[in-house]
Amino acid sequence: MGVIMPWLETVFSSRERTRYTMDGAGLFVPAPLPDLRRALEAAELKAGELFWDLGSGDGRVVFLAAEMGAHARGIEADESLFRQATDIQKSVCPATSAATEFTRGDFLDCSFEEPDVIFYYGGGAPRRQHELYTKLERDMHPGTRLIVFRTSRRPPLNLRSHLNSHPPEYHILVG
Ligand SMILES: C[S@@+](CC[C@H](N)C(=O)[O-])C[C@H]1O[C@@H](n2cnc3c(N)ncnc32)[C@H](O)[C@@H]1O
């Protein structure tokens, strides 16, 4: 496994608390960086690819993807988590900052035609999850990899194939 930049360990190791989000978006459950890195590597994330995290929390996955050379975007409903991520974005080196983008909002308002790799560590109400999966099936272009993180069951999506899945850590589906 590739190395995790020391600044990521420093910034995110002190933020390991699960908590309810303020805006009714559910739970924020921070995952350890090595687990996240394994999932991104299994999805064969490459430098220059466009990476999206649906529900980006404190931004850890977005910064990790940027350090792996991706252009990384996070979409987060909760205002305090969004601010946490954008505060960190201001304090990192200019190249990493330029490779990251955060949007505050509901990822269900997005279409998913652009990204090459999509990360989802969601949970959420079954109805909302069904809506997300329907949109992903409709929008993902051939070759887009979807990482569904920390789930033992294969997500019920009608996509082309599987890649390096490792339940219960992650499932990777290909558009
Ligand atoms: C389990 S946490 C994962 C955070 C981050 N992806 C990570 O792995 O560290 C789920 C996040 O999704 C956010 N969320 C849930 N539903 C959302 C929605 N519809 N739109 C945007 N964010 C959402 C929550 O606020 C929470 O921060």
Image (cartoon, helix red, strand yellow):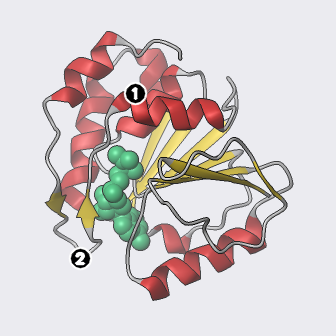
User: Vertical placement of 30 versus 95: above or below?
Assistant: below
Q: Horizontally, is 150 left or right of 26 in the view?
A: right
Under mark 1, the amino acid is Pro
Residue visible at 40% across and 58% down in the picture? 55
Percent x, y of residue 148: 54, 56
Residue 123's disc number:
none
Q: Is residue 55 above or below residue 131?
A: above
Which image quadrant shows ligand 1?
A: bottom left
Residue 41 sits in quarter: top right
Residue 110, position in %: x, y? 58, 67
- Residue visible at 50% across and 77% down? 129
The residue beneath circle 1 is: 34
* Residue at screen point 50% across, 60% down: 152
Along the line of sight, which residue is nearer the eye, 137 or 162?
A: 162
Q: Nearer the viewer, residue 1 or 104?
A: 1
Residue that badge 2 annotates: 24
Q: Mark 2 Cα within 10 Å, few/some/many (few <14, many 20+)?
A: few
**Mark 1 vs mark 2: in front:** 1
